[in-house]
Image (tube, rainbow, N blue to C red):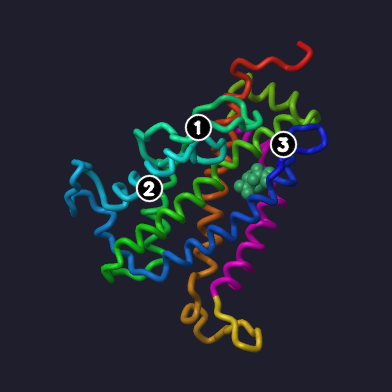
């Protein structure tokens, strides 16, 4: 997908469209995970023994196995893909020539993402208990984690687009040189976009989380709103408000703080 504008820099509007599409991916991934019980055996280290000596939880093991295969087919050479585990093997496919979009950086917040996901999200979307669907639950966890990781690390592209805006660049440069985290955070924040996002997300979670009758009506029961929902809209909105948006913004700030390293403004 071409994310560039007519000046050959990243288009903020196109990037926001990607974030809107990822809302759907995240809501559906959460709905898929929510059909299984919490199954916290898969999150505890030491429950199973692994023939390769891996020490950790079943989810950790599974994630590493999946990422090993994905690394071989060069998934993590793409600038919008970040692994949760290491070490990973080198790709067996030849490397692709991605157009240079991001400035060199070493940001990977997947450790925070998995921590928050396990502590805050899984217990809110799944019923407590154990239904023995360990493989299915871990498969859905991996899908949720990968979608969240992609969305949150998209903050790098968004930050790059904002930095390349000629109207904003001088202010960004001044704030970055002063290492003013709060100032950068304030400048990149767009409350109107955030409010519209949360409103849209609530509608989507309501609609996607309900069944549709044969005549096309949404099955809504006002008396028992929780009863017939595959996922609670409040939980999805809360997830974005307290975790997805703030972490995306942290990624944006971290990226911008590294943006001037080894960089010279054109013409200087
Ligand atoms: O759309 C932007 O401008 C972003 O920086 C992304 C995002 C988000 O995470 O959705 C984050 C910060 C802004 O306040 C608005 C939205």
Front label number (2 vs 3)? 2
Q: CA distance from mark 2 to mark 1?
A: 22 Å
Residue at (66%, 63%) from the top-left corner? 200
Pick the quarter of the image with the C terminus. top right
Pointer 3: what residue?
10
- At 62% from the left and 67% from the top, the residue drawn is 204
Does the beta carbon at disc 3 come under 8 Å from ligand 1? no
- 170 with respect to 141 (left or right): right
> Mark 3 and mark 2 in contact (Cβ < 8 Å)?
no
142 relative to 201 in the view: left or right: left
Residue at the front extreme of this rendering: 93
Residue for badge 1: 107
Q: Is residue 233 magenta?
A: no
SS label for mark 2: helix
Q: Residue, x 49% and y 81% (percent of image)?
A: 228
Q: Mark number for residue 148?
A: none
């Amino acid at each position: 997908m071409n994310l560039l504008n007519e000046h050959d820099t990243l288009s903020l509007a196109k990037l926001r469209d990607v974030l809107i599409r990822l809302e759907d991916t995240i809501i559906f991934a959460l709905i898929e995970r929510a059909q299984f019980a919490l199954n916290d055996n898969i999150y505890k280290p030491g429950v199973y023994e692994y023939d390769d000596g891996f020490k950790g939880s079943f989810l950790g093991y599974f994630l590493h196995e999946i990422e090993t295969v994905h690394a071989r087919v060069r998934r993590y050479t793409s600038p919008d893909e970040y692994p949760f585990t290491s070490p990973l093997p080198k790709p067996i496919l030849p490397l692709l020539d991605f157009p240079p979009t991001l400035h060199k950086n070493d940001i990977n917040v997947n450790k925070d993402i998995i921590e928050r996901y396990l502590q805050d999200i899984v217990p809110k979307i799944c019923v407590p208990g154990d239904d023995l669907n360990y493989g299915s639950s871990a498969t859905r966890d991996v899908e949720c984690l990968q979608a969240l990781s992609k969305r949150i690390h998209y903050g790098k592209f968004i930050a790059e687009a904002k930095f390349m805006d000629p109207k904003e660049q001088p202010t960004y440069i001044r704030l970055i040189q002063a290492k003013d985290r709060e100032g950068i955070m304030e400048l990149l924040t767009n409350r109107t976009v955030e409010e519209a996002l949360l409103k849209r997300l609530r509608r989507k979670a309501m609609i996607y989380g309900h069944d549709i009758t044969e005549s096309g009506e949404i099955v809504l029961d006002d008396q028992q709103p929780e009863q017939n929902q595959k996922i609670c809209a409040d939980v999805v909105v809360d997830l974005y408000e307290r975790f997805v948006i703030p972490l995306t913004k942290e990624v944006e700030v971290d990226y911008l703080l590294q943006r001037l390293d080894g960089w010279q403004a054109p013409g200087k």
